[in-house]
Image (tube, grey):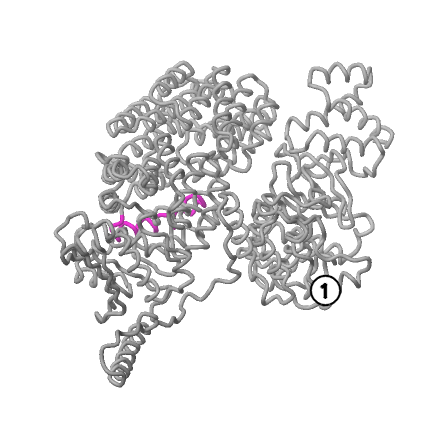
Amino acid sequence: MTPERWQQVGKLYQEALGLVPDQRAVFLTQACGNDLDLRQEVESLLAAEGEAGDFLSAGAMKDAAKMLADKKPLTLVGKTLGHYRVLSLLGTGGMGVVYKALDLNLRRHVALKFLPEGLSHDSGALERFRREARAASALNHPGICTIHEVSEQEGKPFIVMELLVGETLTQRIGGKPLPLEQVLSFGADIADALAAAHARGIVHRDIKPANIFVTEDGRIKILDFGLAKLQPQTVSAGAGDFSTVDDVTTTGLPMGTFAYMSPEQARGEHLDARTDLFSFGAILYEMATGAMAFNGKALAEVHDAILNRQPPPVTGIALNLSPRLQVITAKCLEKDQHLRYQSAAEVRADLLRLKREIDLDTPATALPLKPAAMVTRTRRAIKRRPLVFLVVAVAFVTAAASVAAYSYLRFHTDRARTLTEKDVIVLADFLNHTGDPVFDDTLKQALAVQLEQSPFLNVLSEQNVNTTLRMMGRSPGERLTAAVARDLCQRAGSKVMIAGSIASIGSLYVIGLDAVSCDNGDTLAKQQVRARTKDEALRALDKAASGMRGRLGESLASVQKFATPIEEATTPSLEALKAFSLGMKAFFKDGYAAAMPFYRRAIELDPNFAMAYARMGAMYVNVGEGEVASDYLHKAYDHREKVSEKERFFIESSYYRWVTGEREKATAVYELWKQTYPKDRLPHTLLVGSYDTYGRFDDSLDEAREALRLAPNSANEYATLGWSYMNLNRLDEAEAVFREAEERQLRNEHLLEARYLLAFLKGDAKGMDQAVAQASGKPGMEDQLLMHAAQTAAYFGRLTAARELSQQAVQSAVRNDQKETAAGYKAALAQTEAEIGNFNRSRQQVAAALAMASTRDVSATAALALARAGDLATAATMADELAKQWPRDTLVNGIVVPQIHGAIEIRRHKPFEANEYLRAVAPYELGPDDALYSAYLRGSAYLLLHQGTGAAAEFQKIVDHRSIVLNGIEGALARLGLARAYLLQGDKAKARNAYQDFLALWKDADPEIPILQQAKAEYQQLQ
């Protein structure tokens, strides 16, 4: 096409963009007249926007159209390169020319990056170009621009990457400081992406604002790995491994952009990941102040500033900034890389910690730039005794007492200091000599809360205690006398046992703590305190516990920082604490149902008991009662002011995850929790769920492994690790995990559910039946397994059986007062009925579900079922109401609402509009919350468009990811979708095979199912 013709096309395209589709048709008819070729060119550009969709704003599309109209260099525009149709020029730079293109196979927009014409024969430029592709493609992280493939056209290589729309960080800053919240949020995201790159041995070496992209929805993407240094190691690139030895750049030659170079980079010295952290510090500074950290009129000035001068403090330029941001920035910009942050993860943790404190309006305390040594020696002052004897005698006695006391304390202190961060403590049950039952279990629970505040000490969990008791041939929940506790301590490989006691002397109460070596029974440390009344017992125990923490090796600074009084961290009511401790004991012994009455009683006794609310909320989360859980977790959040740091992490993350639905905030709390309490397995477990949301299954696996390492006797961690292997389709490894758990006699509902689904994936009908049988009669477990069995029956087309099993699941849930769970089961069956064409039955099921409960999760499933069943007005209203009620919920707005609207548009036969909605789900589609259902809807939309290739690609995703889709009915129906897609492509042989696969899968299906009858009729026409 001639430049003049492109100018004409571009002008019409630009004008048509501002019109709605009906107006576009009138406009093009008038503007193009009889020139049908001209109209076709314009319409092809407009149609491409609707078919594949991208994230271009109207302004960005107009800019692209203006390039066409202004005759910008468009040497490739209009050409088809392999399966990419080049649509427009997006931009040019020193190291690349970028075009917007349409992937004709997957019907999505992408960006194609070519070397500039003048560099296409430069071997160094070519190698850096290939380096960029290798480095970026080796990374799979949401903060790094995704590389789809590398191809070649007429001897010219090009990189195919995701199409991003927004602006560079340079443009976002624009010479003005960013709001502090953005500085911290963007900074944490950049640091997270750098950590991912560094973990794979990749040093970027050109980190600067121009290479950081901010998308329209505020996400950060690192671009341009053309100067990346690939450390001497092997990095997996997915399809294969490649050596990452840096053999392109010349030693001693600074690579990168001068104003953002580290001192070692400016000197041409050997570089490692810390050079990126210096450059990141310069970006952090610029975001905070709007000014460059190192600037000058000449390169020599910049060079001198980088090597010898510090920029003005950020707080001196922007007075509203936290002083802690200056501390973080200054540590990034340390000239000596050994004094700098040593990893991007450290920077991210400090930024998130600061962000959290600002978000919660808590005072910013001094930022520890490096974790203080936990083991420190302290001096103990010897109190002077009363003057009773003569001076000489006093001197003698005092000296002797001092020497004896010093020797005793030195001896015991030294022995206590042998405790390290790796050692585990076992808590024995208190000896209660008072005869008052209120102290039974209560003081041990209070002591556990105080000791568990410590990031240094590691208390053996109640769950691990029960597991070890089983291994000892004893009953879970058995009382831990000193003898039993010491035996358990040795079996569990622990170092120290702490035994407590309380006795009454008149009106006084004496509380003692004794830390004993599990190996030889020697006393390592003692504490004894007195309480004048029963009500002061918790305060006295607080003092004893804090003293014991110091004696066992924790630093004074740590004890002072993480020492919320027990009365605040729990409750000032001994009766409420007793009920709570009995709930904890019942939970670890017998599960959710057994614990709930005790937690409920604790709340009745103390309506301000934050952790009792939090535990109740967690119980209801685990049995699927989201609305009730939300009420309890909201109350816990409202009473969180005085809880311990560890409890605050639990309460806040639960609130963000289950009440507001803000997955990103919950994840940030998990990360900070993990950094603060490195020996706590729970944040690792919770991060598995966060990473799963985005399909980051490799990261989930790492967290699951670490959680199990920290809690090797936890049934829950075995279940989590098994799930992580299943998500990656590593079924044999998952089975090995479950087998090991069984050999160790570890059981819970999560393990049973995971084992059922593994049996499904392996086609093990007997294994599925055994899991259902094992769950029979167990509250909170029976209904889950029955519903899984119902979904499996539906997967194979056995709808009558599915309905019966579903009804049994509903009845089981109702018996346990889980109405929301029961309603969710009804809504799920309604969606299944809609997918197979039983629209009236689906609508009836929705009505029944909403009559039982109309909570967020039930309404979401019900609205989707109605959209698929054809009640479009009601579905749209429900979707709008969900978005209104849950404006911050990640999944409601990222998955649920787009899915509902997408399904509505499919029923309206508006596939372009459907895919516009479904585009928002892309970041979550591999996660369990979507499980590729959006791919199923997109495939259906492409069928309506008669685009067989696009439809086949979507349905094939589902078939290829069985371990993610599991027993969802779309997993079976995707095979029918493939058959229909192949027919549209004209490939009857493939279509016939796909129909046969589906019909074989449904060989025992109920014959009256509408979609089965359609499939048989379609297949018959092929014969």
Q: Name the amino acid, label 1.
A: Ala
Q: Position of residue 136 (x, y in %)?
A: 62, 50
Pick the residue in front: 810 or 57: 57
Pick the residue in front: 944 or 587: 587
Q: Is residue 139 visible?
A: no
Q: Please say whether residue 729 is one of the residues in the magenta stretch.
A: yes
How many numbered discs sit on the rendered protein?
Answer: 1
Q: Is residue 334 left or right of residue 834?
A: right
Q: Which residue is mark 1?
A: 266
Q: Please say whether residue 886 is one of the residues in the magenta stretch.
A: no
Q: Considering only vertical position in the picture, is 660 above or below 202? A: above
User: What is the quadrant of residue 950 in the picture?
Assistant: top right
User: What is the quadrant of residue 339 in the picture?
Assistant: bottom right
Q: Is residue 399 visible?
A: yes
Segment tinted magenta in the rendering: 726-746
Q: Is residue 864 left or right of residue 600?
A: right
> Considering the numbered disc 1 on the image, is that residue within a helix, a strand or a loop?
helix
Q: Position of residue 64 (x, y in %)?
A: 76, 33
Residue projecting furthest to the left: 435
User: What is the quadrant of residue 627 in the picture?
Assistant: top left
